[in-house]
Image: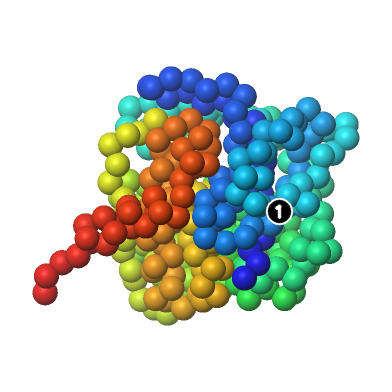
Amino acid sequence: MSLLVTGSIGIDTVSTPLGRAENVLGGSAVYFSLAASIFARVRLVGVVGEDFDLAALEPLRRRDVDLRGVEVRKGSQTFRWHGSYSGAMNEARTVDVKLNVLAERGATIPPEFRDSRYVFLANTHPALQREFAQQLGRAELIVCDTMNLWIENEATELARTLRAVHGIVLNEGEARLLTGESNLISAGREIAQRGPRFVVIKKGEHGSLLFSEERVFALPAYPTTRLVDPTGCGDSFAGGMMGYLAATGRSDPAALRAAMARGSVVASFVLESFSVEALAATTARHVEQRLDELIELARVER
């Protein structure tokens, strides 16, 4: 099944207790695409400025990601993010951000991409997400992401978008902020009542939760001790999940649980390097090995 992602392509500078990476490839759509392409063919829609070196997208080309939806906008500059992590590296501190081209009009979905059946709307203005969704009328599954900025400042637009998508993936802080609920079970159930068929709440090293058909599923994270840079883990989780769903052509609760397990495993590789280096080297065989370990980890006797 065809899988389309819209989102950011950026240039990152990241500092962690283990070092610093300057002007490296980043962006939600990049991490998502590399993760999803382990399982399925991916179509990427995004915008960069004329300062962007297209050779930086070589890791995506090697994964056969369809880049015909990448626009190089003349007179514009590429999105740039500078973040730092400290301590347990649970959350990034934004040192500097330059929206640049992301503050302009949205990307254009090529006509040849509009038959995409599986769609992920990575973090952007909820009204723009809805506009993208309306252009993809043949989609069987549309899932979105969001962030604190839209929850706090665009509540009405976000509410409309939640009614226009089939699923949402967000982190625990965003879920609490969106609902005002401190308890994540209550928060997930409330979000599910606002429109989407399913809700996935990411909890970082503590795993993830799925709310679907009035049921709750809890999945542990794959345990890893090599933590270099968490940037892109959430986008890669979503990419692994959506890539598996597109590959199987399913989105029932059992498939969602299996997809989340693959998303968790894929995200565990991202942690092990700066930028996309470790993710770009990850293969389906690597994922299967860790998936077996995760399944055994979660096994219990009755």
* Residue that carries the numbered disc 1 in the rendered image: 66
Is 275 above or below relative to 181? Answer: above
Q: Residue at x 33, y 57 (%)?
A: 291
Coloring applied to the structure: rainbow
Across and down, in percent, residue 133 comes to 71, 66
At 46% from the left and 50% from the top, the residue drawn is 283
Residue 116 visible here: yes
- Observer able to see residue 174: no
Q: Amino acid at mark 1?
A: Asp
Front one among 273 and 126: 273
Residue 145 placement, left or right of 127: left
Q: Is residue 291 left or right of residue 156?
A: left
Q: Quadrant of the C terminus?
A: bottom left
Q: Residues within 10 Å of mark 1 (few under 14, many from 20)?
A: some
Residue 94 location (% of width, % of height) = 54, 29
Coordinates of residue 113 in the picture (x, y in percent): 76, 63
**Relative to 244, residue 285 above or below:** above
Vertical arrangement, residue 66 with respect to residue 185, above or below: above
The quarter of the picture where residue 41 lies is: bottom right
Q: Is residue 1 left or right of residue 73?
A: left
For the residue pair 129 and 227, the one nearer the viewer reads as: 227
* Front residue of 122 and 259: 259
Which image quadrant for residue 167? bottom right
Instruction: Indicate the secondary structure of the residue bearing disc 1.
Output: strand
In percent of width and height, residue 90 lies at: 37, 37
